[in-house]
Image: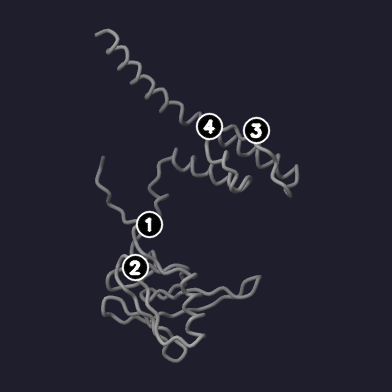
Amino acid sequence: MREQTRSYTTAQPRLTLAHLKAIRQRFSKGAKALQLATRAGEMRFHLGGSSYTATIGGRVLPLRTTSTRAGYGVRHWYLCPHCHNRAAVLFIGKRDLACRKCWGLHYASQSEDRLARMRRSLFKQRAAIWGDYAPAYSLFNDCALFPKPAGMRWETFSRKVLHLQRSEQAYYRAFSPVVDKIMGAVERRTGAAGAG
């Protein structure tokens, strides 16, 4: 197996919009400073006037935010301290804070092969139809046997299941050579063991 050359978002601690919401709420209730323990170290947040600062590894960084109008009201964003672009997530280093692009991080899905992407798509489609229905989490279970979710129109359900079935057929066709290769190796081993 070759050496991993990419850094992934899953490996870095992060500051999400849920953190921003909690920071805003606590400062609005009169907190003077906040502290967050992460794998990269401890962060401290301070409110100076109307702006936030984040201290990590002894380095003080401005924690700027912005907002955009959304159909349901307002959406808040971080502004990356390096590129000043909007970001829903900032990743935390030992002494720095930056967006995914500034850190040069990749999503794990960017390194997946074709079969892994197809498999992820199947699970995503199943979750969109059946949600937390446990049997839908196994590709060994035939989706044609699953019940229609309450509240979903039959036309929508039929269309989604048909699309899922076609996607599953394409996946099984693509996966078939892998199974054949595994079965050939098993047959060679058992044949060699039986002959000896």
Tag 4 residue: 140
Which one is in front in this view, the residue at disc 1 or the one at disc 4?
4
Q: Where is residue 158 in the image (x, y as percent from the top left)?
A: 71, 39
Location of the N terminus (image quadrant): top left
Badge 1 or badge 4: first in the primary sequence: 1
Residue, disc 2: 38
Residue type highlighted by circle 3: Leu
Label 3's element? helix
Is residue 142 left or right of 17 when viewed as pictured?
right
Q: Residues within 10 Å of mark 2 (few under 14, many from 20)?
A: some
Which mark is nearer the camera, 2 or 1? 2
Alpha carbons under labels 3 and 2: distance apart: 44 Å
Dot 1 surroundings within 10 Å: few (below 14), some, or many (20 or more)?
Answer: few
- The residue singled out by tag 3 in the image is 145
- Is tag 3's residue or tag 2's residue first in the polypeptide sequence? 2
Q: What residue type is labelled 2?
A: Thr
Foreground pick, 147 / 1: 147
Which amino acid does the dot numbered 4 rest on?
Answer: Phe
